Structures are given as C-alpha cells and as structure tokens.
C-alpha cells in the first residue's frame, strides 16, 4: 500500500515498455501477425482481382480499396484525407466511450453486489436473466419509442448489450473467488467492508476484464447495428449510406476501419486490465512468449 | 482505541505461554448437506495447554479439518463446547464461533491474497483490525518478513515466490496479529522433503521465539513427532481420540533428532496406532462402496 518500492528491482515505466517491446520482437509473434495479414490480403487479391472468381469478384478488390483509402483525391469522395471519414470515426468512438463507460460503471458494481450478497442476487438475477436473452435488435423499436432524439437510442442499445455482459461476468468473477480467501480475511479480523474491498474487488478482476473484453466487442456490434438503422454519422452509418448509393469501395473501407478501431479499443481494455492486475502478470511470468 | 494500542504493544511477548489454552469438550459435528447425515466428529475431547504444540494425525476423511474449522469459526458444531482461555468460542446456544485474529489459520493450499505483495499481505491484519496505522503495519511487516529470511521478496506477489516462501510468509501474516493460537491444516502437504525440512526448522524457530499455541494437522508422523509436544492420533470417522503420545524431547530441537534412537522408538510406537486406524478407514470405505 504505502512504499511500493520495497525490493522492486529492474526497469519500470517507459524503459520497461521499451524492454518488453524489444523482447516481443525477439519472439515470432509480431512477424506472424504480419505474415497472417499478408496472406489474407494476398488471397483476397488473388480471388478477387486476379482470378475473378464469383462471388469474390462482386466486391471491390484490395488494391482498389487501398488506392482509394490513401488517395488525396478519392474517386468516391471519402479517404484518409477527407474530413467526413474522420468525423464518422470520431462519432462512433465517442458513442462507444459513453456507452462502454456507462455499462461498466453500472455493470461492475451491480455484478459485484450480486456476487457478494445472496439476497441481492435473489432479487436481481431473475430480472437480468429474463432480459438478457432478448436480442439487442429486438430492442430497436422500443428504444426509438422511448427516446426522441437521434443519438439517445443508439447509446441506449450499445450500453444495454454491453451492460448485460459486464454484469454477468462480474458476478461470476465474485463467485469464482476461492472460499479460502474469504476465510483468511475473516480470521485476520476483517469486517464486511474490508472483505469487499480487499477480497471481492481484486479477486473478481480477472473475470471482470474478460467480461470487459467481450463487452466492448458487443458494444461495437450493437452500436453499428443501431447506426445502420437510425444514425447520423458513425461508421455504421457510413457503411449503410455508401451501400445505398452503391459506393462499395467506401463501404469496404468503413468495414476495415471498424476492424482497426475495434481492435485498438479491445487492446486498450486489455492493457488497462494488465495494468490493474500486475500481480497476475508477474505470477504468469512476463517473460513467457 | 486504548485496547487496540495495548494489543499492538504486547506483540513480541515472551509471556505468550500463559495464553492460548484450548479446551475441546465432547464435540460432535454432523453434516447433513443433502438429507444424509454424515457424522464427522463424535464426542471428541482434547485439552491443549497454553503454548503447547499439539499435533493431530489420523486417517484421511476422519474429521480433522472439521475440528479445526469449528475452532476457527468457519462452521458450526452440533453439540459440545470449545473454549479458548476459559471463554466459550462455541457451545450450547452458540453453535458457530466468531472468527477472529486470536486464532489465525494457515491453509492447506495457502491463502495469501495473490493480489497483494507479501508485505501487504502481512500488514493486512493489523490494518483492518485498526491496531496499527498503515505505515506502522507496513514497517512491522517488512521487519517480520526479514526476520523470517524473506526480506528480499517483501515487495513480490505470492505468485512470484516459491511455495515454501509463500507458506513462511503466511505464517508471518498470522503471527503479526499476535494470535493466541496458530491453526495449521497440513500446511506442508504438497512440499518436497527438502523444502519441508526448511519449513520445520523455520516453524520451530518461530515457536521457540513466540511460544504460541499450535494446533497442527498432518498426515506425516515424523513431522508430528519432530514438531509436537503431544501427538493426538484420531480414530477413523467419526473422529475421537484414539491415542495420545507425549513427546518429551527437549527444545530447541534440530535435525540431528531425526536419527536418534529416542525419536525412532516414538515413531514406531505411534505408527502402530495410526496404521490400525488407516486400515479401518480403508475397509470402511470399501464397505461403503460395496
Ligand atoms: N461440508 C461438508 N458437507 C458434508 N460432509 C462433509 C463436509 N466437509 C467434510 N465432510 C465429511 O466429513 C468427514 C470429515 O472431513 P474432514 O475434512 O474433516 O476430514 P479430514 O480428517 O480433514 O481429512 P483429510 O485428512 O483428507 O483432510 C469426511 O467424511 C467428509 O466427507
Ligand atoms: Mg483435512
């Protein structure tokens, strides 16, 4: 708690990051990723632009998409150099930020209490289990009826989906904590609140972060679905809008952008997780490939 | 918070041998998880003197852990009474003992909080009980870990150190609370012989320094005799005391003892009783399966 520096040796902060990055290039991992992406692009190109096999020839090829993407003067009007592209990314990211924060802020405490108190769980769990199986798309009409604006239904849908996942995983996280930690806390003289802060909270973190990884994916999924149905700006809107006017190149560009942005957001969640669970990182041996 | 600071001050007491008397009288424990009664402990009585190292051996499943859990307040007893220093922990009208830092348990599989460093683990008890400030507790934890030969790893997480170090740290985590009794449930079970012998020396060293009452469950007879003042052999389920072996070997003890004649004789004497019960337990198991 207090002096963290008792017997901490080795690098920290930036130098630790550099050390880890350097080390990770010593393993085959990053190269494998490049090889994988390269192989995929090659196959895509081969099927689409070279052999022109149906149905692959019906979609824009990788060379075409990449040229458009990096073009200062895009044929279809959207590229890395046009403002609307960035505006759409910004709109979606902002929505994800709000929805994911809301879902986490509500879901984690709710899940913690559900896992911790049998009584509280008996009240809340049946409701959760009843609502959870309803597919997020089934909520669309209701959300439009409930909220008048453009923005609110989209946020509502993305939050809802992600909230269920987070709550459930957090609850399971608390239940997964070994009984002996509760007993140890008890015989060391803990009161109930100490058990909550020192056992329930940290003990459930591994599950919580697994849940958050899934939950951010689910948030993107429902966000894009909502944006496609009723949206102004956003990557889902971009996909749908370009589809409507047959700008298939722009559509594929938006899809790939979604892939990238989604990847980055889940990497951020992962990084936050390992930051908060140093104990786990270290126990697993950070040096392992 | 007067009582709190008084408690904190008496931590390294040599007069500890005046406290920690456990009296287990006619304790019976029946489990009935799904309507089927399991009589785990029946009419079991053990008197443990202050500062005694009391070793419990007995066949697997006979009810040793059940007894320890009742003392620690992890579960209730069906009848009988358990006292600590003349005060009732559990008994008629109060089947479940309160959990408290006067009886700290060291668990079979280890239960250091994996999310806290060893020093934070050790400092935990005094902090939550409010007997020390965070800084005091932390300072004391680092000192006590150093005393146990763990100064180099005080800032490490349990997952980063060997199981032997973790178990030693867990005993330190118990001792910092100045408990009346240390309850150990096969703490060295999964360890290799060499680590085990280091653990034994370290525990004996701790005991010679603190004279804390120790209630120690084990399957290892040699361990029991090497460490204990008395070895209590339990019968097969339901657990009762079958034989009590007094180990009148002087302390401090060290490893030369293991090859002495005196030690051999005691082991042989106890082995017979344990073996008899183990065979009974095995046959009872066969009957249940048949
Ligand atoms: N929670 C429980 N519910 C039902 N039966 C139980 C429970 N805990 C233990 N038992 C039964 O009580 C008996 C005694 O168990 P206990 O754990 O006390 O044995 P033990 O002597 O510690 O065994 P071991 O040496 O294997 O640890 C066993 O037959 C066990 O199956
Ligand atoms: Mg046991």
Image (tube, rainbow, N blue to C red):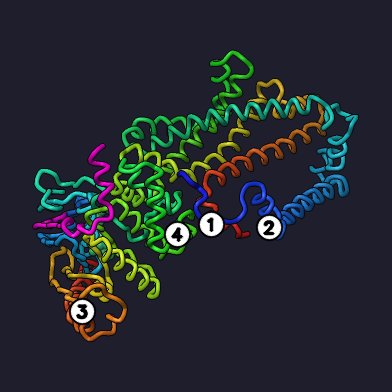
Residue beneath disc 2: A23
Where in the figure is residue B9, as x and y percent of width and height? Answer: 27, 48
Q: Which residues are magenta?
A: B1-29
Kindly report which numbered mark, 2 or 1, lies closer to the viewer in this rendering: 2
Mark 3 and mark 4 on one chain = yes
Which chain is home to disc 2? A
Q: Which residue is mark 4?
A: B151
Query: Which residue of the protein is positioned furthest toward the top in this rendering?
Result: A148
Mark 1 vs ligand 2: CB below 8 Å = no
Spatial distance from mark 2 to mark 1, Cα to Cα?
16 Å
Cα separation, mark 3 vs mark 1, equals 42 Å
Q: Is residue A81 visible?
A: yes
| Residue for point 21% across, 57% down | B16
* Disc 1 target residue: A284
Which residue bears the numbered disc 3? Answer: B271
10 Å crowding of disc 4: few (<14), some (14-19), many (20+): some
Residue B94 occupies quadrant: top left
Residue B133 painted magenta: no
**Front residue of A57 and A153:** A153
């Amino acid at each position: 708690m207090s002096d963290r520096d008792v017997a901490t040796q080795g690098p920290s902060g930036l130098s630790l990051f550099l050390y880890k990055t350097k080390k990770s290039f010593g393993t085959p991992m990053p190269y494998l990723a490049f090889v994988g992406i390269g192989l995929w692009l090659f196959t895509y190109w081969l099927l689409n632009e070279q052999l022109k096999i149906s149905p692959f020839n019906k979609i824009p090829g990788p060379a075409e998409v990449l040229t458009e993407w990096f073009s200062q003067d895009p044929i279809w009007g959207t590229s890395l150099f046009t403002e609307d592209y960035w505006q759409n990314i910004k709109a979606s990211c902002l929505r994800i930020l709000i929805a994911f924060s809301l879902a986490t802020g509500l879901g984690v405490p709710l899940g913690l209490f559900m896992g911790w108190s049998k009584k509280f769980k008996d009240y809340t769990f049946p409701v959760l289990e009843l609502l959870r199986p309803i597919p997020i798309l089934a909520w669309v009409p209701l959300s439009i009826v409930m909220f008048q604006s453009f923005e609110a239904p989209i946020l509502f849908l993305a939050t809802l989906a992600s909230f269920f996942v987070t709550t459930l995983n957090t609850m399971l996280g608390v239940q997964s904590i070994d009984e002996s930690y509760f007993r140890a806390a008890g015989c060391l003289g803990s009161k109930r609140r100490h058990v909550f802060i020192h056992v329930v909270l940290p003990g459930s973190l591994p599950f919580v972060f697994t849940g958050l990884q899934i939950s951010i994916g689910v948030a993107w999924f429902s966000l894009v679905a909502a944006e496609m149905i009723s949206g102004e700006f956003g990557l889902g809107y971009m996909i749908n809008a370009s589809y409507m006017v047959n700008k298939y190149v722009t559509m594929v560009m938006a899809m790939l952008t979604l892939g990238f942005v989604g990847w980055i957001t889940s990497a951020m969640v992962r990084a936050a997780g390992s930051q908060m669970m140093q104990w786990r990182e270290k126990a697993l041996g950070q040096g392992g490939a | 918070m007067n009582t709190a600071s008084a408690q904190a001050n008496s931590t390294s007491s040599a007069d500890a041998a005046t406290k920690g008397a456990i009296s287990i009288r006619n304790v019976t424990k029946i489990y009935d998880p799904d309507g089927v009664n399991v009589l785990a402990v029946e009419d079991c009585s053990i008197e443990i003197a202050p500062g005694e190292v009391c070793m419990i051996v007995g066949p697997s499943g006979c009810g040793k852990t059940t007894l320890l859990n009742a003392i620690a307040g992890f579960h209730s007893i069906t009848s009988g009474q358990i006292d600590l220093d003349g005060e009732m922990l559990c008994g008629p009208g109060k089947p479940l003992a309160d959990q408290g830092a006067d009886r700290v348990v060291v668990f079979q599989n280890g239960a250091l909080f994996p999310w806290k460093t060893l020093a934070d683990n050790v400092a935990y008890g005094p902090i939550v009980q409010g007997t020390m400030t965070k800084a005091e507790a932390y300072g004391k934890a680092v000192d006590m870990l150093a005393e146990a030969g763990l100064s180099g790893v005080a800032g490490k997480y349990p997952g980063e150190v060997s199981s032997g170090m973790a178990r030693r740290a867990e005993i330190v985590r118990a001792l910092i609370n100045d408990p009346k009794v240390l309850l150990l449930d096969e703490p060295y079970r999964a360890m290799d012989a060499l680590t085990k012998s280091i653990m034994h020396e370290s525990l004996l060293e701790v005991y010679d320094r603190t004279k804390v009452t120790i209630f120690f469950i084990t399957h290892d007879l040699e361990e029991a005799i090497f460490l204990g003042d008395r070895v209590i052999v339990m019968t097969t389920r339901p657990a009762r005391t079958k034989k009590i072996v007094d180990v009148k070997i002087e302390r401090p003890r060290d490893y030369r003892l293991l090859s002495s004649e005196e030690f051999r004789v005691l082991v042989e004497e106890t082995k017979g009783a344990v073996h008899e019960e183990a065979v009974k337990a095995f046959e009872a198991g066969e009957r249940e399966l048949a």
